[in-house]
């Protein structure tokens, strides 16, 4: 019985120690204008995620696990593209970025300067743009 208690206690501790990512939910087209303005001050990242896709979930977890930068130096937006498909389409159209899922897009000075998808998503890339 102690064996099971130890396993579940460690899992609980692991969940409790998990860092909180300050995601900003991207839920309106108006926010895209704000993102462009904000990107003049600091890098902005949009993580496009499909809540029904296991690969997308795995990429999101890996991104959050890798993320090790000063959260004041970047703003992170989260886009649930199943709920907000029109925003995802506008991102692709407005910023000339081919739609993918999962996808990380980084903006600086009003321009999309990086995009990666699937297993190419790497949170350490953000550090290069700070």
Image (cartoon, rainbow, N blue to C red):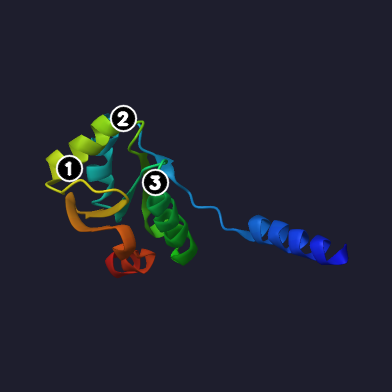
Q: What element carries label 2?
A: loop
Residue wearing tag 1:
92
Q: Is mark 1 on a helix, strand or loop?
A: helix
- Residue 93 is left or right of residue 42, and the answer is left
Residue wearing tag 2:
28
* Cα–Cα gap, marks 2 and 3: 22 Å
Quick one: 5 or 68, which is closer to the camera? 5
- Residue 57 is left or right of residue 79, and the answer is right
Residue 99, percent across and down?
20, 45
Residue 28, percent across and down?
31, 30
**Residue at point 19% right, 35% down?**
90
Q: Which residue lies furthest to the front in this view?
A: 1
Considering only order in the chain, which callout, 3 or 1, is on the residue closer to the N terminus?
Answer: 3
Of tags 1 and 3, which is closer to the observer?
3
Quick one: 15 or 21, which is closer to the camera? 15
Considering only order in the chain, which callout, 3 or 2, is on the residue closer to the N terminus?
Answer: 2
Quick one: 25 or 58, which is closer to the camera? 58
Considering only order in the chain, which callout, 2 or 1, is on the residue closer to the N terminus?
Answer: 2
**Residue at point 32% right, 38% down?**
81
Q: Is mark 3 on a helix, strand or loop?
A: loop
Residue 108, percent across and down?
22, 55
Q: Residue furthest right?
A: 1
Of tags 2 and 3, which is closer to the observer?
3
Q: Please rate how many residues cluster around mark 1, counting C-alpha atoms within 10 Å: few if below 14, some from 14 to 19, many from 20.
A: some
**Residues tagged 1 and 2 counted as in contact (Cβ below 8 A):** no
**Residue at point 49% right, 63% down?**
65
- Residue 5 is left or right of residue 36, and the answer is right
Q: In this view, does 90 lie above or below 62?
A: above
Q: Is residue 59 above or below residue 31?
A: below
* Cα–Cα gap, marks 1 and 2: 15 Å
Instruction: Give residue 53's mark.
Output: 3
**Residues tagged 1 and 3 counted as in contact (Cβ below 8 A):** no
């Amino acid at each position: 019985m102690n064996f099971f208690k130890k396993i579940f206690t460690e899992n609980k501790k692991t969940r409790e120690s998990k860092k909180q990512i300050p995601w900003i939910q991207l839920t309106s087209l108006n926010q895209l204008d704000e993102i462009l303005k904000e990107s003049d001050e600091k890098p902005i990242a949009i993580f496009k995620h499909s809540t029904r896709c296991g690969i997308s979930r795995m990429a999101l977890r890996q991104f959050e696990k890798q993320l090790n930068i000063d959260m004041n130096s970047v703003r992170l937006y989260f886009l649930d593209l199943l709920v907000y498909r029109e925003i995802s389409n506008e991102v692709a159209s407005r910023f000339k970025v081919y739609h993918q899922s999962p996808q990380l897009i980084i903006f600086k000075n009003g321009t999309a300067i990086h995009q990666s998808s699937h297993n190419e998503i790497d949170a350490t890339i953000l550090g290069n743009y700070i």
